[in-house]
Amino acid sequence: MAILLKEEGLYDRCRIYATDINEEVLRKAKAAIYPMDCIPKYRDNYMKAGGKKDFASYYTSGYDHAILDSSLQANIVFSQHNLATDRCFNEFNVILCRNVVIYFNRALQDRVHRLLYESLATFGILGLGRSENLRFTPHEKEYESLDGGERLYRRTTQSSWSAPIQAIAGKSPPN
């Protein structure tokens, strides 16, 4: 995402929030060191996404690993976030939540979809995993599909829901 934003001249005007519940996953992501055997797949994805340069110009290789250019992390905030218990902390133009929701029961899926909806700006883009979709979610009708195969959706409605997200998790809102 950082590379594509940089190539479009938008990176300096953006902030990317990289979140996960697992601190070890966040530590590895922040280190930006990847096994070289993963690079062909990443390069192919980069090219499919419209990459403009040689992908190798964005990393340094050595000792069977690739280290991403540190300038790509200048606008990335790595933070622990729990979809099951935490609230929205910003309004986002793009949310990528891939291959997570499928592991939750129905009640938690509904909570997470409400959280994603409330966190996404009107006309913002939501990306889900290939095994996930918006069918039968509380906000299914409030999105339009941009690419069904890639599970990309655009939020089309403004929020009319104003109850605290805690109420969805079965907690009483604070007095």
Image (cartoon, grey):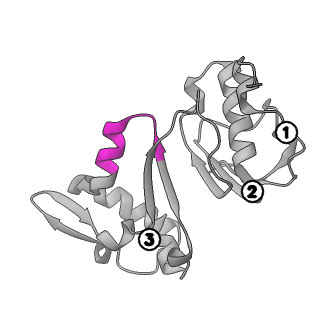
Name the dominant secondary structure of the magenta segment.
helix
The amino acid type of the residue labelled 1 equals Ser
User: Depth check: 74 or 156 in front?
Assistant: 74
Which quarter of the image is occupied by the C terminus?
Answer: top right
User: For numbered disc 1, what is the local secondary structure?
Assistant: loop
Can residue 36 be seen here? The reply is yes
Question: Within the image, what quadrant is residue 125 found in?
Answer: bottom right
Q: Position of residue 107 (x, y in %)?
A: 70, 19
The region drawn magenta spans 19-29
Residue 162 tag number = 1
Which label's residue is closer to the chain start, 3 or 2?
Answer: 3
- Name the quadrant containing residue 138: top right
In-image side of 154 versus 72 (left or right): right
Q: Nearer the viewer, residue 143 or 161?
A: 161
Report the amino acid beneath label 3.
Answer: Ile
Disc 3 target residue = 3
Mark closer to the observer (1, 2):
1
At numbered mark 3, what does the secondary structure look like: helix, strand or loop?
Answer: helix
Res. 121 mark: 2
Closer mark to the observer between disc 3 and disc 2: 2
Q: Residues within 10 Å of mark 1 (few under 14, many from 20)?
A: few
Please, is residue 134 above or below residue 85 in the view? below
Q: Is residue 123 left or right of residue 40?
A: right
Image depth: mark 3 or mark 1 in front: 1
Residue 38 forms part of the magenta stretch: no
Q: Are marks 3 and 1 in contact (CB under 8 Å)?
A: no
Give percent across and percent down for residue 168.
74, 24
